[in-house]
Amino acid sequence: MELSFRRHAFALRSPIVAAYGVLDRRELVEITLESEGGQRGRGEAAPLEPYDGVSMERVVHALERYQEALAGPLAPGVTALDACRSADELPQALAAIDMALWDMGGTRAGRPVCALLTESPAPSVAVNASIAAEDPSEAASAAAAAVAAGYSCVKVKVGVGDDDARVGAVREAIGPAVSLRLDSNGAWTVPQAERALERLSRHGLELVEEPVSGLAATAELRARVPVRIAIDETAAQAGALTSRVADAVCLKISRCGGIGGLLAAATLVRASGAEVYLASTYDGPLGIAAALHAAAALAPLPPCGLATLELFEGTPALAVQRGEIAVPTAPGLGV
């Protein structure tokens, strides 16, 4: 099997400000796998070093090792994904291989990936709007526009700037019926988070994502505040998926090592009694498509953080319509 890849970047409509820094462009790696019979599949590696600590150079190194692992015949009983995992276990790189294999399998079968995952996939996935503006009035305007466009859930970054003013302005703009979700990217200590959430909880929060970092801190905070807590970055820690420290777990294709890894992770989370929802690490169209197929198989889900392609310059693929994204119906990943 032949593996090729290329690096490319998307410009963002406006910089994204988070607790881990400012993002003004998104670089990704697109891969192509081609079998000896000429069948092809595409995938995408989406490391985000300020978020997950994985550099683009680290991913490229893993992909170069995969090229070597796939260049010759595989041992009996060893799959292409097995061979790549043995060469380098980096989830962000394995996710690209996994996506490409599902894309190839769906194309071969003439069916979308979601139809390979379940007999009755959801036709669309509800998504939340992400409010990137730091200024309260700009955040309120963006949130009001999202609700007018049909979104039923809005997520606001906190841990930067004047959180109280921004969250209050957004709640006033969206009204009481729309779900309001916060994400601090682990910016707070437990005492800081407790004080902040005592103030912000009056705005009626669906949940707060990654208010603190680490399993112990999350468990401590959850016992202190009257707000549902979700883990995101902390979900990468050993034992996190079955730790029962949070009400919900945010899963991502890149961190889980692809579609197969994400579905396995979701099974563990649900067995622990926590809720699952999906999000992107500002992935490109291939990564978003892969997440949509996984979400369609896991449905029903709360609104997922997959409406991020609209943050890129240009006309987005997989556009949001009335707060939902239609799952691709073409064979393979469908993009």
Image (cartoon, rainbow, N blue to C red):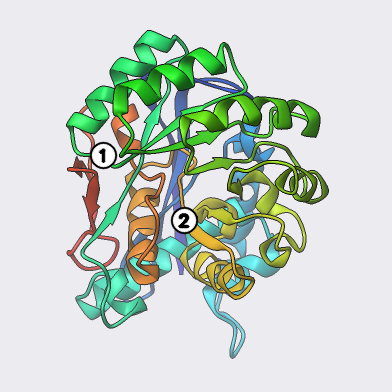
The outermost residue toward the right is 216
Q: Which numbered disc, 2 or 1, marks the residue closer to the eye?
A: 1
Residue shown at 36% from the left, 71% from the top: 297
What is the distance, in whole Å, between disc 2 and disc 1 at their CAs?
Answer: 16 Å
Q: Is residue 121 shown left or right of residue 93?
A: left
Instruction: Looking at the picture, tell me which residue is in the foreground, 82 or 145.
Output: 145
Q: Which residue is mark 2?
A: 277
Within 10 Å of disc 1 (Cα), the crowding (few <14, some 14-19, many 20+) is: many
Whole-percent x, y for residue 142 in the image: 30, 20
Looking at the image, is 14 positioned above or below residue 330?
above
What kind of residue is marked 1? Tyr
Would residue 85 be seen by someone viewing this image from the given angle? yes
Task: Report the number of numbered marks.
Answer: 2
Q: Is residue 36 shown left or right of residue 274?
A: left
Q: Which residue is mark 1?
A: 151
Looking at the image, is 194 positioned above or below residue 218?
above
Looking at the image, is 277 positioned above or below residue 173?
below
Instruction: Looking at the picture, tell me which residue is in the foreground, 212 or 31.
Output: 212
Instruction: Looking at the picture, tell me which residue is in the foreground, 287 or 217.
Output: 217
